[in-house]
Every structure is written in C-alpha cells, then in structure tokens.
Amino acid sequence: MTNLGKRVFVITSFLIMFCSIVAAQETVAFYGIKSTDADINMLSMTEDLYYKQLSDMQISVLDKRSENTEKEVNESDDKFFEQTGCDYIFFAEIKKLPDSKWLCTLNMRNESLKQTQTISKEYDSYYKILMESKSSLKSILSSLLSDSTKQEVSKPLKTDNTQASTDSIAGTWTSEESVSKIVIMRGNRGFIIFKNGATMNISVKSTYTENGSTQFNITQTSSSNASFFPELDRRLAMEAAVTAKPIEWKLCINEDGSLEGTKITLIQQGENVQEGSVSVKWTRQN
C-alpha cells in the first residue's frame, strides 16, 4: 500500500469511528417555545434557560430555534418534525389563563416511536416558570427515558453467568432515603436526583465478578459537590467535597430484579470524615 493509500485508509477509518460514536449518542432537537401571551424578552430568557438545562444533562442538544421560529408546532403534522436527525425533539408551550395564571406544557417527542410525552403545570406567575424549569425538565426527561425503555426492560434481568448489558438496567430506580430518583439511560450513562435538589451525572459499566456473575460499576462523573453527601454534617461535607473521590456503586442483580451491593463514599465518624463503604439496594420503578 502506498503512503497516500495508507493516509486515506487511516482518515477513512477515523471518520467511520467518529460517526459511530456520534450516532451512538442520543440527541435532542431543541425547538424552543410556542407562545402568543408571553413577553418576547421573557420568552427568550426562558428558551435560553431550557436550552442550558437540557445541555447540562450530558445529552447532545441541537438548537433548532432559528429554523422553526415562524412555524406552528403541531404534533399531528409529521412534516414539522421531518429530518431533524435527532432521537428526540423538545418544545414547550406557554399560555396565559383567564384567571391570570400561566400554563406551561413541556413536550418531548421520541422520533423512533413517533410519540410525544408531555408534562403540564399551572403557575401563579410567569416568574415561577423560570424558578421551576430545572425540576420540570428533569421530570419530563426521566419520564421519557422510562417510557422509551419499558419494552426493552419489561422482562426480568438474567441472573445466570452471562454478562448483562448496561442497557438491561435502563430505566428509573429508587435507592437510599436521600435519593429522589435514579435514571439509567442507554449509552452507559445516567443521573441521580437527590431530595435536596442536587443532580449527579453517572457512568455505567458492566464487568464479570470472580464467580462469573455480572457486576454493574456506577461512577459519579459530575464534579464533587457537598450536596452529594447529605448524610454528613453540612460543614464537614463542604470541607470534604473539595478533595473527595467520585462516589462509586458496585451492584449485582438479585432474583427479584433489584440491584444490591456496596456504595463507596465518605462516611462520618464523630467529627472525622473518611472513605468507606455502605450496603445499598436499588429497586426498579419502571
């Protein structure tokens, strides 16, 4: 093979590998907000906030606002959603009600299923929409992911010696008292929502244990935060979080489909904090 041929082969191989990685990542097309009642400046601020919140969820977000500003968002019109090249489409609708309250509806459309999940809520003022945008987006995202993976995870998880895929645990889980919700997504990633409002991004890997069963290794990927240690005194948590290692979970599948194992985190003993492990159990919600 000539030098030119080698270079072409290397470049072609790299492009194929890059395209495969991009294709494997779930993407969301951000269509913005439809509203005839909200002030244009407030609307722009809300759109920017929603876009930032989606982008912070470690999901590839494509801003489609400029292409769809003049279009009418119509769920029944498939032409509106053509050729986005994304797995999901997000758009919102904001209306002012006769009693001066505001109705905000968040929509997440699954392109492969051609179905849209929605969450609607009334607010006493427009300002409160901005205040609750993060929690609303987290809720609709977790609901969408749960619904889109139900068919794949409806069967019990295998407990034999065959290594299970990380996709087999995709869905929504509950765990410790301090945790509100755990969402495992396809593509070896997910996030944990704490009851104190903190959100932690996580990565998921599956490995074999010494006895041949599957172990799921779940690791914190977000920067350390004192809110990730609600069991500690706040002062100690803030001091320890500066140098804390990422929290890890090592979990195996039970016969009932739950995940059980250990959590490696910071543990308080009196006025001291040190790394240790505690027993944990995750239970699937859906």
Image (cartoon, grey):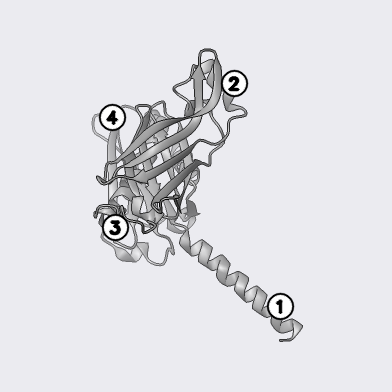
- Decide if residue 128 is in sight here: yes
Q: Secondary structure at mark 3?
A: helix
Q: Residue at x 50, y 31 (%)?
A: 265
Q: Judge whether 161 appears above or below 196 on screen.
A: below
Structural crowding at the residue carrying mark 2, measured as other residues with C-alpha within 10 Å and reported as few (<14), some (14–19) or many (≥20):
few
Q: CA distance from mark 1 to mark 2?
A: 52 Å
Q: Residue at x 36, y 59 (%)?
A: 162
Tell me the quadrant of the picture where the N terminus can be found.
bottom right
- Image mark for residue 152: 3
Q: Secondary structure at mark 2?
A: helix
Q: Secondary structure at mark 4?
A: loop
- Decide if residue 94 is in sight here: no
Quadrant position of residue 120: top left
Report the front residue among 231 and 52. Answer: 231
Residue 17 location, x and y as percent?
56, 68
Q: In this rendering, which labeled residue sits more in front, label 4 or label 1?
A: 1
Q: Amino acid at mark 2?
A: Glu
Mark 1 = which residue? 7
Q: Judge whether 234 appears above or below 118 on screen.
A: above
Mark 4 = which residue? 100
Structural crowding at the residue carrying mark 4, measured as other residues with C-alpha within 10 Å and reported as few (<14), some (14–19) or many (≥20):
few
Q: Amino acid at mark 1?
A: Arg
Give whichever of discs 1 and 2 has the lower sequence position: 1
Q: Judge whether 36 appears above or below 228 on screen.
A: below
Give whichever of discs 2 and 3 has the lower sequence position: 3
Residue 278 location, x and y as percent?
43, 30
Q: Judge whether 174 appears above or below 80 on screen.
A: above
